[in-house]
Image: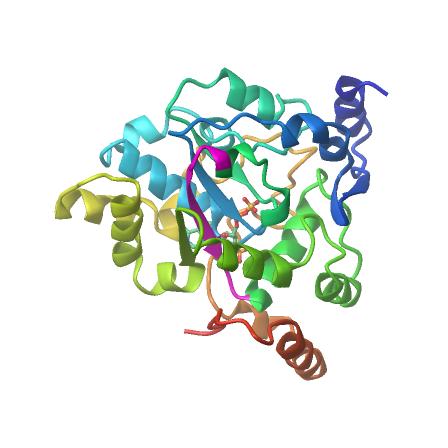
Amino acid sequence: MALKDMKMLNLQRNERIDVNYIKGILQPAATCATWDEIWNFQAKPDDLLISTYPKAGTTWTQEIVDMIQNDGDVEKCKRAPIYIRFPFIEWIIPSLDSGLDQANAMPSPRTLKTHLPVQLLPPSFWEKGCKIIYVARNAKDNLVSYYHFQKMNAALPDPGTWEEYFEDFLDGKVCWGSWYDHVKGWWNAKDKYPILYLFYEDMKKHPKREIRKIMEFIGKNLDEEALDKITYHTSFDIMKKNPMSNYTSIPGEIMDHSVSPFMRKGSVGDWKNYFTVAQNERFDEDYKKKMMGTTLTFCSSL
Ligand code: PPS
């Protein structure tokens, strides 16, 4: 089936997408169908890449980066929805362009988005020495956020029950694979490549400090007033109301915000409202095994 037909089929029948594997990592079938093209994507030296495991704070970081790049000009950042401003390189958005087409059509300097685990990143990003901002979020909140997102987003598989999804997440049987391997893989890469590794929880606790880190990393120099403005404009409450960052412009057949809004809670520790005591114990035990030996640590409540 041609890719174009597949996109329309999803939209018309309002069905969930198919999934498949790329080198052992579950991915939307449309991503698998274009994998060779994605793998051979030609990055440019002045590309900036925002990389995350899904639901770790991508959109938040994108808005911050755009605000910094535009010297704190709110109106400029409202020029288009977030998914148009930042091509998502491995994504085929039903009824819209592919991320690759968008990226290839975009003038430089480009800021791109990916959820790919480190081993699946197109090699040209490494070869060209592109700067990369990686954002990680504690696994428990990440799991809860991803579960709700899959419920509202027909462009991802149905998550099943909470209990089923909980096990799938621990097993890495979700799109873009294991959270554990993802955060560890990128953590290890940061010592070899120009990667700024950030944490969602730090951004919540010290937004201005983390925004300043991003600003310095991308080589900008804004005054305190601009930084304050960016901190305000990129707060959860403001971004939730901003149609250019809250994904409400995606057709309702794909994202149904009445099931769960894209800008859902934006907090640290929401997992406590979903994990049973037994699930929490099982999670912690499994976590210790999977994260053994890494220097990477997270906080899951503030
Ligand atoms: S995606 O679909 O993978 O790109 O999603 P992503 O943007 O990575 O993650 C969505 C979660 O981030 C929350 N979010 C924010 N939190 C705090 N402050 C701001 N400004 C902000 N913007 C987005 C969003 O609400 C999702 O988290 P949950 O826990 O589901 O609310």
Query: Dividing the picture into quarters, in which one does residue 30 lie?
Result: top right
Total residue callouts? 0
x then y, percent, for residue 227: 21, 47
Quadrant including the N terminus: top right
Q: Nearer the viewer, residue 38 or 256?
A: 38
Vertical order, 280 against 82 (above or below): below
Q: Residue at x 62, y 79 (%)?
A: 288
Q: In the image, is 93 to the left or to the right of 187? A: right
Q: Nearer the viewer, residue 183 or 84?
A: 183
Vertical order, 145 against 48 (above or below): below
x then y, percent, for residue 82: 46, 33
Q: Is residue 32 magenta?
A: no
Residue 110 visible to an observer of this rendering = yes
Q: In the image, is 163 to the left or to the right of 264? A: right
Query: Dividing the picture into quarters, in which one does residue 108 lie?
Result: top left
Vertical order, 200 against 37 (above or below): below
Vertical order, 297 against 185 (above or below): below
Instruction: Please give the range of residues in magenta.
Output: 127-138
Residue 117 visible to an observer of this rendering = no
x then y, percent, for residue 41: 58, 27
Q: Residue at x 50, y 72 (%)?
A: 300
Q: Is residue 132 magenta?
A: yes
Q: In the image, is 28 to the left or to the right of 240? A: right
Q: In the image, is 7 to the left or to the right of 66? A: right
Quadrant including the C terminus: bottom left
Q: Residue at x 17, y 41 (%)?
A: 222
Colour scheme used in the picture?
Answer: rainbow
x then y, percent, for residue 20: 81, 41
